[in-house]
Image (tube, rainbow, N blue to C red):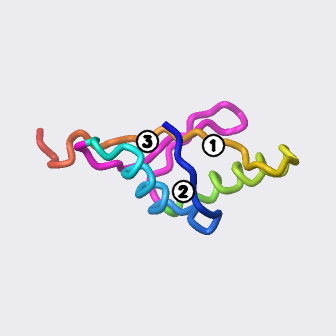
Amino acid sequence: RSARLESEDMFTFDSILRLTERTFPTCKHPFTSFNYFDDDGDRVTVSSELEMGPLRGFYFQLCQQQQRSSKPILKLQPIINRNHANLT
């Protein structure tokens, strides 16, 4: 599924998690983080606002490379916590 952030000001960890929850409303487990693939093809996991810096830099680099009026598509893979009750 695809979703679009309304503005770059909403490019925060919490905003992306809320957008993910709205995009997948039937998911019964909480979303905890998400993955993306950087320009080297490495999978990067973002699980807090502190880890958003490299993702923002990567996205804005994509924006500069495209030189078009439309924004590039950033593919994020949400991660859910299936053990949200900490059951063992």
Q: Amino acid at mark 1?
A: Leu
x and y percent of residue 81 in the render? Answer: 28, 43
Image point (36%, 43%), residue name: 24
Residue placed under numbered mark 2 in the picture: 51
| Magenta span of residues | 28-48
Mark 2 against mark 1, which lies toward the viewer? Answer: 1
Image point (50%, 44%), residue name: 45
Relative placement, left or right, of 87 versus 28 is left
Query: Depth check: 45 or 29 in front?
Result: 29
User: Which of the two discs, 2 and 3, labels the residue nearer the N terminus?
Assistant: 2
Residue placed under numbered mark 1 in the picture: 74
Describe the element under mark 2 as helix, strand or loop. Answer: helix
User: Which of the two discs, 2 and 1, labels the residue nearer the N terminus?
Assistant: 2
Residue placed under numbered mark 3 in the picture: 78
Image point (70%, 49%), residue name: 58
Q: Amino acid at mark 2?
A: Glu
**Residue 17's image quarter?**
bottom left
- Label 3 and label 1: CA atoms lie apart by 12 Å
Q: Quadrant of the C terminus?
A: top left
Residue 72, compared with residue 51, is above or below; it is above
> For residue 22, which numbered disc appears in the image?
none
Extreme residue in the left direction: 88
- Label 2 and label 3: CA atoms lie apart by 15 Å
Relative placement, left or right, of 33 versus 65 is left
